[in-house]
Image: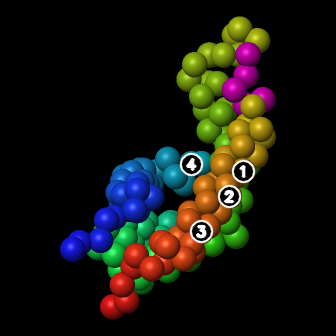
Amino acid sequence: MPVKRPLGIVILGPGFILTSLWNIIALMDIKNYYYLFQSWPGEFVAARVVILWATRLLGIASGVGLLYRKEWARKAVCGLSCFAILFVYWKYPYDEFLRHAEKLDELLNFSDHGLSIASLAFMSCITACIIEVAWASGVLYYLTRQRIKGYFVSG
């Protein structure tokens, strides 16, 4: 009798695959990426790009592995979640939020009406960091529950 796949795995597996693919597509626009991180040394930006590619490819593989009940995939997603928590500010640096908001202000001509998206950059950055840590913590909690751990098979 086949084991019923937990709902969380039904959501997390495709979720990791789709969000990783989405982020890879965003990484393809390397000019915009370097624009957003222009205040960083070029070597740091290049290292960030390489690490993001690696984590996104691992995210795709892990998403598939979750759907196939692979223990290595559960552990990889736990590792990715820990990485996300530890390096959350590296993922969402304030400078990037501010530069993006300033670009939106310029494109949308909000300053003509006394409005500014850039004034919301700090709170947006803090909110993104809180959401990222909460999500990664929830994934860690879920994947380390006994019932969920028991669902996966080694090998």
The residue to which callout 4 is attached is 35
Residue at x 78%, y 40% (from the top left corner): 122
* Residue 41 seen: no
Please state which amino acid type lies under the numbered disc 4: Tyr
Alpha carbon separation for disc pair 4 and 2: 26 Å
Q: Which mark is residue 130?
A: 1
Q: Residue furthest bottom?
A: 155
Residue drawn 45% across the image and 79% down it: 150
Name the mark on residue 140. 3
Dots 3 and 4: beta carbons under 8 Å? Answer: no
The reply to whether dot 2 and dot 1 touch (C-beta < 8 Å) is: yes
The residue mark sitting in front, 1 or 3, is 3
Q: Are marks 1 and 3 in contact (CB under 8 Å)?
A: no
Mark 2 → mark 3, Cα distance in angstroms: 10 Å
The span shown in magenta is 115-119
Check the picture and name the quadrant holding the C terminus. Answer: bottom left
Amino acid carrying mark 2 in the image? Val
- In this view, the mark in front (3 or 4): 3
Q: Secondary structure beneath disc 4?
A: helix
Image position, residue 39 (x, y; %): 69, 55
Identify the main secondary structure in magenta.
loop
Q: Distance from label 1 to label 4 (Cα)?
A: 25 Å
* Residue 45 placement (x, y as % from top left): 58, 65
Asked whether the viewer can see residue 9, the reply is: yes
Going by the numbered disc 1, the residue's amino acid type is Ile
Residue that appears at 50% across and 66% down: 52
- Give the mark, 1 or 3, whose residue is nearer the N terminus: 1
